[in-house]
Structures are given as C-alpha cells and as structure tokens.
Image: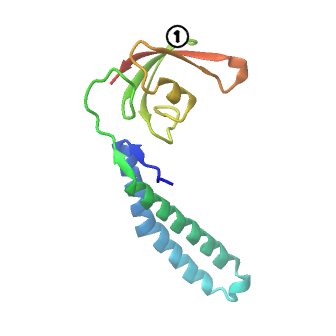
Amino acid sequence: MSKQSFELTQKQYDDLLERKRYLEEEGIPNNGKEIEKAKDFGDLSENAEYHEAKGLQDKLIHELTQVKAKINRSSVIKYNGVTDEAQIGNNIKLLFKNENEVLTFLLISEDGNGVDEIDIESKLGKSIYKKKIGDEVSIEANDPSLGELYFKILEIY
C-alpha cells in the first residue's frame, strides 16, 4: 500500500508547520502541566480531571504524529506563471451563470474553506480541475431544489 502524498500551497504547508510548532512547544507541554496538576487531586482511578487531561494528551500526540507524517509526504506547489489549465495553486475566476456573478478563489488540494479556497475534492473543484479558460461546467447543487449550477471559467492565474 503506497502512502498518500499531498500537494499543498505554501500557506497550507506553513500552516502545518505552525500547527506542529504549537503542538510541540505549547499544546503538549501545557497538557503535561495539567496532568501533573490533576494528579494532586487524589486517587487517580476516580480523578475526572486527570482522565480528561490524559485523554487530551492522547489526542494531541496523535495529531502531532499525523501532522509530522503529512509534512513529510507533502510538496509545495510552485506557481510557474500563466497557465491555460486549472491546476492546484491557481487562482480561478468563474462566472456563476445562474446568478450572473463572478467568483474568484484559489484552487487547493484539500480542506478548502469554500469561500476564497476551493479544494479539488469538492464538487466545484472536481468539475473545474484541469479545465481551460472558456470551458463551461455544471454541478448538482447541494440543495436539490436549486437543480444544476452552471459556471464558465473566465481566467486562470
């Protein structure tokens, strides 16, 4: 089984590094202090504060392990200038034809916020990934009463 690799924007990569730093330098050490403080409350078998702090410790250590693994399997997308095909790391300008509205966002690999970042695993992201300027796409709306949503790619930069 091959390990998944991740293509990230510089910001996504920097955010992962910051999360790693936080967990190593603040989250886990502060949790350790809470565990020590909770030990002073008495019998550990009935000490809710201790068990809660230990549970949090497990979560923090698990998250740190996952963040480190993701950093090790990630590469940063290098923007090479103007392209005519929508790729991860490109800004995309779309005409939302249903509303005659222009939308602009960054196309990313995962965890897009749905506002100024769209990831390629979303319906919209999948539909425009590797499409060209002038291409038109449609997706089924999340709300069935809205039917199909239609878009035209205006610009890729």
Q: Nearer the viewer, residue 85 or 60?
A: 85
Q: Residue 32 location, x and y as percent?
A: 51, 77
Q: Is residue 128 above or below residue 74?
A: above
Q: In the rendered view, would you say 58 is above or below 9?
A: below
Residue 61 drawn at (x, y percent)? 51, 68
Please state which amino acid type lies under the numbered disc 1.
Answer: Asn
Mark 1 is surrounded, within 10 Å at the Cα level, by few (under 14), some (14 to 19) or many (20 or more) other residues, namely: few
**Viewer-proximal residue, 34 or 12?**
12
- What colouring does the structure picture have? rainbow
Which residue is denoted by mark 1 in the rendering? 100
Q: Does dot 1 land on a helix, a strand or a loop? A: loop
> Residue at horizontal 36%, vertical 50%?
14
Which residue ends up furthest to the front in the rendered image?
1
Q: Is residue 41 above or below residue 129?
A: below
Image coordinates of residue 112 in percent, x first then y, are 49, 38
Q: Give the image location of residue 31, x and y in percent.
A: 53, 73
Residue 94: image quadrant is top left
Q: Residue at x 44, y 59 (%)?
A: 69
- Whether residue 47 sits left or right of residue 13 in the image: it is right
- Residue ranking furthest to the left: 81
Q: Quadrant of the C terminus?
A: top left
Q: Residue at x 41, y 12 (%)?
A: 134
Instruction: Please state the total of marks drawn on the protein image.
Output: 1
